[in-house]
């Protein structure tokens, strides 16, 4: 547990455990940020004999995660991930030949030109989102979840979900929440660093039961969706989804059926929760900072007007909406600690030596909330991104900055980034063009319910806990247009709603309701 002299500094250690006793159990980025202010932009934590480093500056991200990306692109060994994904995450996602083949197979979603093919379903789903909000605004939270799940399952598996109460959608989110909770760092004992913990029998080791159950829940969903895709191919009813291309090239890529199911699953996990967390945070910010909402409304009125709905090509002419997206990423990043990387060999950086297997966190929260870099970082102010591209204070050296840090770094950069950017642009435009969002009124007091800017769920992703909100359409002309656009979107939906034979699984409601994870 003792810190080697060749490591960056960090909090004092205790014998054997190192820093295990002070490793935060939830919302680790808050503590990581406090430590960054004390120990600097590169510090280390000892987790038993293993080393973790935390990076909290754009300069160190560039020098270590990008310029030395060939050494810092592994994923840490993780018992929870191995059980949850039956070893497939490690097999597919470690930086090896399989990973390279998979990245190749992801071409149709990875590249900007490939992602363009999926825009029609993204636009149609976004239309359904505003249609749903028009008709049942009180279900905001579940409408956003339906949207983000349906758009990703359509693109990846070719199957859409028109309602939230399809058994799959609730199941997907239930399972993803469980997965995010059980795989959160600090949420369970450090089994990877202290392997003797693995000898604890399952009946006393709640984390073992949770990982197994999580695997069961996720598997049912992934392979159910894969069967639907396979059936469609057999019927000759392909709809251009991502997995059709993978199945067609299965031999070329050397993938088993199980790997294909997990590949789809990993993309689903990566895409559903993130997009919905972003949109929910956006609505919280719009309620809490009405001035920002007003400016976005004014810009949309000027550029789009109320005679038609926004189109994707409007986005280039909407600098304030672009700034709003950057500010939401900064203010409430969906993955405040990204996803941890690990070093594949010994790495030398500054005057330090980081051993092979060092876990590396990029503390996105700490970078984006640094008062030396951002004026008043705890205030939501999209305008900062109009003053300069990176929203920084005057005089800050921005030579190492980039705005897509929220999507990760180096060779592991998020493969869904282009799809996500399209989704965010479409929804920011549509939601703000169509509605005004304000805090809900407490029926007992008649007062506004305060906006819970820190009322967020635990887990690897930072997503708001369910909240209420008043949503008003901005004009009857817009209401009319939403109805017409939704009717037109039906033609896009049809091919993602083909008849099915595969039985819908019971997606773990019993286990979830059994309160095993509460
Ligand atoms: C707002 C939206 C999103 C955000 C903020 C986001 C963020 C991230 C981050 C921070 C990582 C870790 C990168 C790293 O390790 O350096 C990641 C990885 C990943 N993302 Fe996203 N993501 C988003 C949307 C999506 C979408 C739509 C998809 C699917 C189409 C997706 C699929 C994935 C996958 C599969 C990985 C793991 C890649 C690997 O391990 O090599 N993400 N994402």
Image (spheres, rainbow, N blue to C red):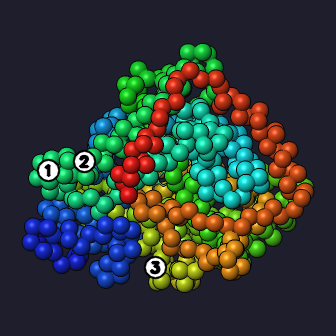
Q: In the picture, residue 49 is in which quadrant? A: bottom left
- For the residues carrying marks 3 and 2, which lies nearer the camera in this image? 2
- In primary-sequence order, the first of circles 1 and 3 is 1
Q: In the picture, residue 100 is in which quadrant? A: top left
Q: Height in image: 82 above or below 402?
A: above
Which residue, given by chain and number where applicable, does mark 1 sit on?
A: 200
141 relative position to 255: left or right: right
Q: Secondary structure at mark 1?
A: loop
Residue 34 in the image, given as x and y percentages of width and height: 35, 79
Q: Residue at x 66, y 39 (%)?
A: 162
Q: Residue at x 87, y 62 (%)?
A: 475
- For the residues carrying marks 1 and 3, which lies nearer the camera in this image? 1
Query: Closer to the camera, 44 or 168?
Result: 168
Q: Residue at the far front: name it.
A: 444
Q: Is residue 336 visible?
A: yes
Q: Height in image: 285 above or below 158?
A: below
Label 3, ligand 1: CB separation under 8 Å:
no
Q: Quadrant of the N terminus?
A: bottom left
Residue 329 in the image, given as x and y percentages of width and height: 55, 65
For the residues labelled 1 and 2, say whether their Cβ atoms are less than 8 Å apart.
yes
- In primary-sequence order, the first of circles 3 and 2 is 2
> Which mark identifies residue 370?
3
């Amino acid at each position: 547990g003792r810190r080697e002299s060749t490591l960056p500094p960090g909090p004092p250690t205790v014998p054997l455990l190192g820093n295990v006793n002070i490793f935060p159990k939830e919302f680790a980025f808050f503590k990581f940020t406090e430590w960054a202010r004390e120990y600097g932009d590169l510090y280390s934590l000892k987790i038993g004999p293993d080393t973790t480093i935390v990076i909290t500056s754009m300069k160190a991200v560039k020098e270590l995660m990008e310029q030395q990306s060939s050494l810092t692109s592994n994923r840490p060994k993780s018992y929870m991930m191995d059980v949850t994904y039956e070893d497939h995450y490690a097999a597919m996602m470690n930086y090896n030949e399989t990973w390279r083949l998979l990245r190749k197979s992801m071409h149709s979603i990875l590249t900007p030109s490939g992602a363009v093919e999926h825009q029609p379903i993204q636009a149609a789903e976004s239309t359904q989102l505003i249609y749903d909000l028009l008709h049942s605004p009180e279900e905001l939270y579940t409408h956003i979840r339906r949207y983000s799940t349906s758009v990703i399952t359509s693109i990846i598996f070719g199957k859409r979900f028109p309602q939230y109460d399809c058994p799959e959608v609730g199941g997907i989110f239930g399972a993803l929440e469980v997965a995010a909770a059980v795989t959160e760092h600090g949420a369970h004992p450090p089994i990877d660093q202290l392997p003797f913990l693995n000898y604890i029998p399952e009946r006393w080791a709640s984390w073992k039961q949770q990982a197994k159950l999580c695997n069961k829940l996720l598997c049912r969903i992934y392979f159910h969706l894969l069967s639907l895709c396979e059936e469609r191919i057999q019927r000759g009813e392909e709809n251009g989804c991502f997995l059709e291309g993978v199945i067609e090239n299965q031999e070329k890529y050397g993938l088993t059926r199980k790997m294909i199911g997990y590949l789809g699953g990993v993309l689903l996990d990566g895409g559903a929760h993130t997009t919905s967390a972003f949109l929910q945070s956006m609505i919280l910010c719009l309620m809490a900072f009405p001035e920002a909402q007003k400016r976005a409304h004014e810009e949309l009125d000027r550029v789009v007007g109320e005679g038609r709905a926004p189109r994707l090509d409007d986005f280039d002419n909407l600098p304030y909406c672009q700034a709003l997206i950057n500010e939401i990423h900064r203010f409430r990043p969906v993955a405040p600690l990204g996803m941890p990387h690990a070093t594949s060999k010994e790495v030398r950086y500054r005057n330090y030596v980081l051993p092979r297997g060092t876990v590396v966190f990029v503390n996105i929260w700490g970078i984006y909330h640094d008062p030396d870099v951002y004026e008043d970082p705890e205030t939501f102010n999209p305008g900062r991104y109009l003053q300069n591209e990176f929203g920084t204070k005057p005089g800050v050296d921005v030579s190492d900055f980039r705005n897509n840090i929220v999507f990760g770094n180096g060779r592991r950069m998020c493969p869904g980034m282009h799809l996500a950017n399209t989704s965010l642009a479409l929804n920011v435009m549509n939601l703000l063009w169509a509605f005004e969002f304000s805090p809900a009124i407490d029926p007992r007091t008649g007062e506004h319910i305060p906006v819970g800017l820190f009322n967020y769920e635990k887990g690897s992703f930072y997503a708001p806990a369910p909240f209420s909100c008043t949503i008003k359409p901005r004009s009857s002309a817009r209401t009319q247009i939403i109805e017409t656009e939704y009717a037109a979107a039906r033609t896009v939906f049809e091919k993602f709603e083909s008849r099915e034979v595969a039985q819908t699984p019971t997606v773990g409601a019993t286990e979830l309701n059994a309160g095993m994870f509460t």
